[in-house]
Amino acid sequence: MSTLNVCVEGMGVWSPLAGDFEALKAMLAGAPTEAPPARPTASTLPANERRRAPESVLLAVEVAGQAVAMSGYDAAELPCVFSSAYGDQLISDYMCATLASAPAELSPTRFHNSVHNAPAGYWTIATGCHATSSAISAGRASLGAGLLEAATLCAAEERPVLLVCSDIKGNGPLGDMSGTKSSFGIALVLSPAATSRTVAQLELHLVPHANHALRPAPATGAWYETNPIAASAWPLMQNLAKGEGECTLAAAETLALRVVLETSA
Amino acid sequence: MSVLIQPLAVSAYTATSALGHGLESHLAALSTQRGGLRENDFSSAPLACWIGRVEGVEDAPLPAAHAAWECRNNRLAWLGLQQDRFLDRVLDARQRYGASRVALVLGTSTASIGATEEGYRHLDDEGRMPPELRRPPVHAPHSLAGFVAEALGLEGPCLTVSTACSSSAKVFANAERLIRLGLADAAVVGGVDTLCDSVLFGFNALELVSPEPCRPFDQARHGISIGEAAGFALLERVNAAPDAPRLLGYGESSDAHHMSTPHPEGLGAELALGDALARAGLRASQVDYINLHGTASQKNDEVEAALVARAFPASTRASSTKGFTGHTLGAAGILEAVVALLAIRENFVPGNLGCTHPDEACGPQLALKSEPHTVNVALSNSFGFGGNNACLAFGRAPA
């Protein structure tokens, strides 16, 4: 079998241009939208944690909080998958710069915040979640691989799962390598079967040896091209906003994930 | 909540660490109590501590075809893949199932950040990455899995798990789910972490690094010794390798307590243990050996020792092997899974090197010296920053 069926029960989005899913829908419809604050609010975090948390955590927690609130589930009960192509690039840039000049001065807090699972850690601590939490990466395929992983967990364990895919804007020589020039996050709460809270159904098909289909389209200069998650998520977000449509996401170097989205009448 | 799983065959496995390249060198060192730690001769600036460094990584460049992935972490991966005929076993599985039906799930916490650090030490005149390191895929967490997928020619689901020190334990769970749902027929799992300034100076900043070789569970322990390792396992359905040892279960949980300190009562660790036993359909009394997380940090060992003492009978044997290898961080899960598999294969329990006076919290389970012991069922614990816990259960194939 190479097909999975899951239902979307919550959605969260944050970009510099649209701070939630409603704003994104308005933006897609060509309506004027107000840009969100430069620092995502991440209101799920207690105030003291919010001040301490690095940018990658704020972004991931912001979209996770939106999606879980929409779904109505208790965050403490949801296994969660956090996917990111680069993790906290700002901390990595700080660490590499500090290690090159004064390694003994490395900040212990920034070091423990540098782990790829920092967003998963802050999220599970803030929500009292003891379920499994994961932090994954798949390069440019981090959205598709994240969706495949979360849907796999959801279908195998037959329980709702929170998926968060996000990457922050980079900085310095490392930012130059990642080419990430804007921050973007998307979160979905997936459930194994339709409920009264279902907003869309996803049929996921693995398409192997899809080298051709995965070749990136020529750059157009659009904002979403400057973030690896946003670039992948753009067609999926349009379908989520429309309530229907098909798109193909990269799940690995040559493996595609065809995502058929439907809304039941 | 956890449901019984169908066991999977671990049809091939291998490890490379400070104890040597491949299974036989690990077995020899573990059974004769010969540790692999040495005084730190790695960091770019002096740091007084002990490390578990793999010999020969510097002399093992990647094949020219994969030169774009060149860095210490991928070199160690490549070195590791060549031990115990593991590469051949994967190519055979690829042939049998097809490249798109073999998943690849690898854990790492460092990935190739060492190469990024190196770039920052040698920035060009404009403050950019030097030309020889201007290779974007190497400066990303997915570098390891990206390289290994290319080197093995695998085209199935491909994922990096990076949950600090539980990374390469959790990969067994990802792979089991993919195979259970029929999204893959086999999976290569494992992990690689390499020594780098980030972890040496990072753990030093947290005051978690021991000035002497680490002494897990000893009353006089002073923190961790950092090591590096590569390890891999091939998972298939049992009918493809009926005599191979088995993945019986796994458990995963979150502490929901603190970013860098374990839950004081070991709540998350106990949940992961319960989850693993439930999925495997085992009672604690059926467990012959536990390879403990046992980092030699004050807090981890105290909490883990208490958990083992209260959850297991005296007949269960337990030890941490980090005194031999150092804490290999993102590779610890797979390295210690391989130790558990070796314990089953050889019917022996490795000793807890470095411990002479066990912490008061330790029960009678702790094996200070390596000993012969029938091991039909072995667990491996891995706990990471962010309160991320995993427990694996392995067993011998039924006679």
Image (cartoon, rainbow, N blue to C red):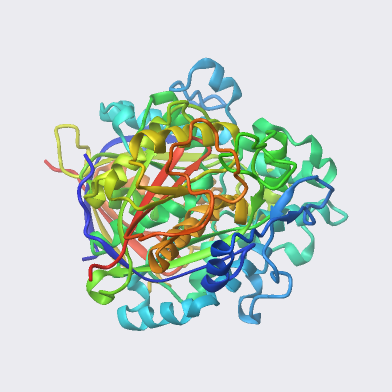
Left/right placement of residue A5 relative to residue B89 reads left
Q: Is residue B62 above or below residue A129?
A: below
Q: Is residue B346 left or right of residue B80?
A: left
Question: Percent position (x, y) of residue B363?
Answer: 44, 37
Q: Quadrant of residue B92?
A: bottom left
**At 39% across and 25% down in the image, what residue appears?**
A127
Q: Is residue B385 above or below residue B73?
A: above
Where in the figure is residue B387, as x and y percent of width and height? Answer: 47, 35
Residue at horizontal 59 percent and vertical 20 percent from the top: A51
Residue drawn at (74%, 56%) of the image: B38
Q: Point out the residue furthest to the right here.
A: B125
User: Residue B54: where, in percent of width, then height?
Assistant: 67, 64
A7 or A104: nearer the viewer? A104
* Residue located at (23% from left, 67% from top): B398
- Nearer the observer, B273 or A90: B273
Image quarter of the C terminus of chain B: bottom left
Q: Is residue A76 above or below residue B3?
A: above
